[in-house]
Amino acid sequence: MEEEYQNPLTLITKDQKMEFTCTVKAMKALFVALLEFELVKVMDFSTTKLIRVNMSSCYEGGSKVKKYKIQGFRIQFKSLKMHDAEDI
């Protein structure tokens, strides 16, 4: 007995279709915004989350790098002083 053919598009719910559409739009926006060398790095990722995580790790670095950046900013902030000639 042969099974009746079902169109795969009818098996998708409206919510799934909306989620897919939003994901595709977000990925297109990211791809347009990236430079060519950045695009090559993230071209094979299937979700926007993977792209975001990869790009943030490229530009922000790992947890040690973040820790040292924050430490540097704290030192800079503590060293800021108002000069005698300056007023509010």
Image (cartoon, rainbow, N blue to C red):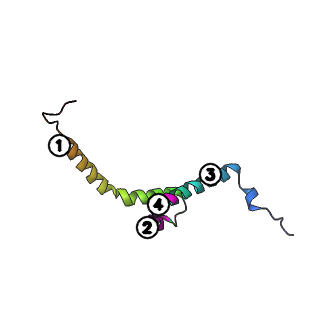
Q: Secondary structure at mark 3?
A: helix
| Amino acid type, label 1 | Ser
Relative to 87, is 51 on the left or the right?
Answer: right
Q: Secondary structure at mark 2?
A: helix
- Counting every numbered tag in the picture gives 4
Q: Which residue is mark 2?
A: 37
Instruction: Specify the segment rendered in magenta.
Output: 32-42
The question of residue 7 being in magenta is answered with: no
| Point 33% across, 55% down: residue | 63
| Amino acid type, label 3 | Glu
Q: Nearer the viewer, residue 57 or 27?
A: 27
Where's the N terminus, which quadrant? bottom right
Residue most extreme to the left:
84
Q: Are marks 1 and 4 in contact (CB under 8 Å)?
A: no
Residue 76, horizontal then vertical, whole percent: 21, 46
Q: Residue 67, which numbered label? A: none
Residue 8, horizontal then vertical, whole percent: 74, 61
Q: Residue 79, which numbered label? A: 1
Residue 79, horizontal then vertical, whole percent: 17, 43
| Amino acid type, label 4 | Leu
Q: Which residue is mark 3?
A: 19
State how far apart marks 3 and 4 are (Cα).
23 Å
Q: Nearer the viewer, residue 34 or 4?
A: 34
Residue most extreme to the bottom:
1
Of labels 2 and 1, the one closer to you: 2
